[in-house]
Amino acid sequence: MRPSPRAVPGRTALVGLAALILAGCATTPPKPPANPDPFESFNRDVYQFNDALDRAVFRPVARAYLRYVPDPARRGVNNFFTNLTGPNVVLNDLLQGKFRQAFEDGMRFVFNSTFGIAGLVDVASSKGLVRHEEDFGQTLAVWGFPQGPFLMIPVLGPFTFRALPGAAVGYFTYPLFWVEDARITTPLAALGFIDLRAGAETTIRVVEETALDPYVFVRNAYLQRRNFLIWDGDPPVEDLLDELDEMDTQENDGMQTGDAGPSP
Amino acid sequence: MNGLRRSLAAVFLIWLCTAAGAAGTEDDRAATARAVVERLQDALLEAMKTGSYGARYALLDPVVRETHDLGKIARVALGRSVWKTLSEAERARYLALFAKMSVASYARAFKGYSGERFEIVSVQPVRKNGMFVRTRLHKADGGVVQLDYHLIRQRDGRWRIVNVVSDGVSDLALKRDQFRDIIQSRGFEALLAEIESQARPHPPR
């Protein structure tokens, strides 16, 4: 997040881009709003719809895929589609001023697309080029744009207002978007969707098995996860520590009233 | 001059001892906190190799209660303002159900061992009486889950887990958000009913 001053070539576009990057480096992601979900009742309806659609269509397909397609094949498919997000990751590395990471992710994409047979094998990870998760929604956060309202989008699931442009940028930077032959793109898009849903199976099971209120669980977990990605895996823990401080005073209250402690 | 030198040497010696002592306790603390997390994770691996839900629950019950400060977790999850309004009986019921739900969620999630392993990445002190233990769960399919434990030192000097953060998702925050929502929309009794259903082996959903 430190601003890194560097010489800029004379072209206006580059100057503009560099200015954006430096502006981005100088800010930290703004704090989430007090009420992150002003459209809750609408969002809950969409959640119900998505859940019903998932149970009727996507879940059976994903479960069949997980049951009948062998693990190495599924891993290859997942590597293939993950690799295709490479250009989007590199673009957003650059927009956030992470030049070293952009270089690594660029190399990753090149290695996996060539030696990794169009991305089917993740050769880069075994060479120490680990995968980074970046998208334009995170870039906007790093640039200082506020999170905006939480949104549940039909079919696609949880989003924030700030993450929506990220979906569009992800779409246009996806190499398959530039392939015009529908005979290639349609089955690949279907397979990509199945891969995505199969990858979420464990998470969805966790929600079903441990959530008291599945909607609130999904919203909270999604917002926390986005924050984690925006801060590159190291979000500030101040809030939690404040909670614990609050709890210490609370504990003193508890002492006076006779604290029950962990139950027998 | 000699006297000054001697007293300086004495001061230096005292400083050295206290510095070494402080460094020692710092390391000891980290090692103790680390041992608590290892104890939990060893038990989780053991549970994964254990067949039935009942057996896993029985195995994990004492370990989860010992390694976690469930009373503290329960109170933060509920929020101070709600906790204050509860009667003694309500508090006791809530704490008992909360502890059962915590054990049950571990017993449900950690099953079907297929080569998983835990790795402790780092142990760092955080603010007062806190320790942050970063770990990774390496899954059989090559996937990795980042599991971070926040521990607090108790009055008796023991360390206990007060929060688990998996891939950036804090369990405490997740619980508190849900609890608040259920209490606001349906009340405390409804929350107890939900927790009770989660404490059972197979939730109705």
Image (tube, rainbow, N blue to C red):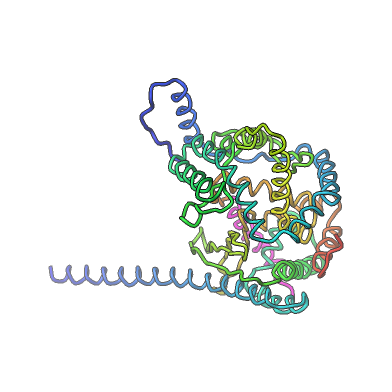
Q: Nearer the viewer, residue A111 or A18?
A: A111
Residue B136 vertical position relative to residue A219 in the rendered view, above or below: below
Residue A1 vertical position relative to residue A253 in the rendered view, above or below: above
Q: Nearer the viewer, residue B187 or B145?
A: B145
Q: Main secondary structure of the magenta part?
A: helix
The verdict on residue A261 being magenta is yes
- Residue A185 in sight: yes
Q: Nearer the viewer, residue B112 or A252?
A: B112
- Residue B130 in sight: no
A24 displayed left or right of A258: left
Total numbered circles? 0
Q: From the top left corner, tell me how far across and down residue B150 is, in percent.
A: 58, 62
Q: From the top left corner, tell me how far across and down residue A34 is, in percent.
A: 68, 40
Segment colored magenta: A239-264
Q: From the top left corner, tell me how far across and down residue A79 is, in percent.
A: 60, 51
Residue A125 vertical position relative to residue B52 in the rendered view, above or below: above
In the rendered image, the residue lying farthest to the left is B1
Q: From the top left corner, tell me how far across and down residue A127 is, in percent.
A: 46, 55
Identity of the residue drawn at 24% across and 72% down? B10
Q: Please tell me in which quadrant of the rendered image residue A5 appears.
A: top left
B135 displayed left or right of B200: left
Residue A53 vertical position relative to residue B83 in the rendered view, above or below: above
Identity of the residue drawn at 71% across and 42% down? A189
| Location of the C terminus of chain A (image quadrant) | bottom right
The verdict on residue B99 being magenta is no
A108 displayed left or right of B83: left
